[in-house]
Image (cartoon, grey):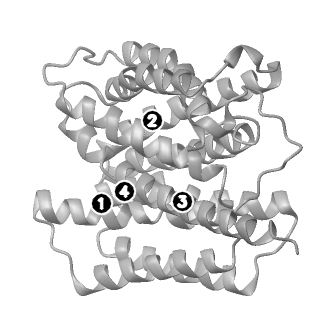
Amino acid sequence: MHAGAPPRNTDMRDSGRLALAALVIANVALAFGPWFVRAADVGPVASGFWRIALAAPLLAALALAGGAKPGRLPGGVWVLLAVGGIAFAADLASWHLGILRTTLANATLFGNCAILMFPIYGFLAARAWPTRSQGWALALAAAGAALLLGRSYQLDSRNLVGDLLCLLAGVLYTIYFIVMARVRERMAPLSSLALSTAASILPLLVAAILFGERIWPGDWTPLLGLALVSQVLGQGCMIYALGALSPLVVGIGLLIQPVVAATIGWMVYGERLGPLDLVGAAMVAAALVLVRRGDAPLAPDPSAPHLEGQGAADDR
């Protein structure tokens, strides 16, 4: 009677919904990052260092509590984790420097250019063109992003350095996504995030010292916000989503960040939201729904080994 098939389909649908919820939560949490960076009383790279350094012990404790055994990892996975950690450290350093040298709208636009690059990587890796529904979703998302950012984007020579730094950050963020998506094929989310986070600590500290920044804070509140909201919650949910959703869905999901950033600007800085902003936000939401309807969650490969012996525990 094949009684086992319906529960499996239900489990996959539930997994897809959970991954999509994680993607939304991740981008909402990550949208608070620029606010915390501007509120910190340390240098921009130093704020990135504290984001990582404060989050790393908590992430490691959570991973170990889930049964992580990193000693079993082969050398190739360690290399990927190191590359991912260094790429993320360079991403944070360049983006935090850029945030203070350009407008928030420009920083959001260029810092999230992975919106386009990561889906392109996904299509190249799959050696396939986007389907009609995927193409419509991309077009809808692009139009929504243009409405959200078009009114506030400013091409100004005074912002050139900041714009270039944020664009570099977006490229590095794409590299981080590609590497960590490969890591997630072999590891559970908490363990992969904990180890890649640890690999980011030293590069950020060295960079902050070389830039001559103030490192020790007088007010820990913004840095704790960066660590708990942006790194633990935001990146934790993002790493989970990377292992369950396609690059196209993840890329379009990044557009949630400008929507939330605009809302923060309205609530904190009194930046008025106009009708076009609301229409753009609705288009981004519609694009995410459209692309998910035609995009199945990545089914786990039953033959793939769980190298740490704890994949199910961490994937809860």
Q: Position of residue 154 (x, y in %)?
A: 33, 65
For marks 2 and 3, give the CA distance. Answer: 27 Å
Q: Residue at x 85, y 47 (%)?
A: 302
- Decide which of 186, 201 is in the foreground and name it: 186
**Position in image of residue 204 (x %, y %):** 45, 21
Would you call the spot at circle 3 few (<14 residues within 10 Å), some (14-19), or many (20 or more)? some
Label 2 belongs to which residue? 92
Percent coordinates x, y for residue 106 in the rendering: 37, 58
Q: Is residue 101 visible?
A: no
Q: Is residue 270 left or right of residue 151?
A: left
- Asked whether 274 or 30 is in front, the reply is 30
- Alpha carbon distance from label 4 to label 3: 15 Å
Q: CA distance from mark 1 to mark 3?
A: 23 Å
Secondary element at image label 3 = helix
Which residue is rendered at x = 26% and y = 36% of the image? 225
Q: CA distance from mark 1 to mark 4?
A: 9 Å
The residue lying at 53 percent from left, 74 percent from top is 288
* Mark 1 or mark 2, earlier in chain: 2
Q: Name the N-terminal-most of marks 1 and 3.
A: 3
Residue on which disc 4 sits: 28
Q: Are marks 2 and 3 in contact (CB under 8 Å)?
A: no
Depth check, mark 4 against mark 2: the one in front is 4
Residue drawn at 63 percent across, 32 percent down: 84
Of the numbered discs 4 and 2, the one sitting upstream in the chain is 4
Looking at the picture, which amino acid does disc 4 mark?
Val
Is residue 304 visible in the rendered image? The answer is yes
Q: Which residue is mark 1?
A: 261
In this picture, is 269 found above or below 71? below
Q: Residue most toward the front?
A: 1
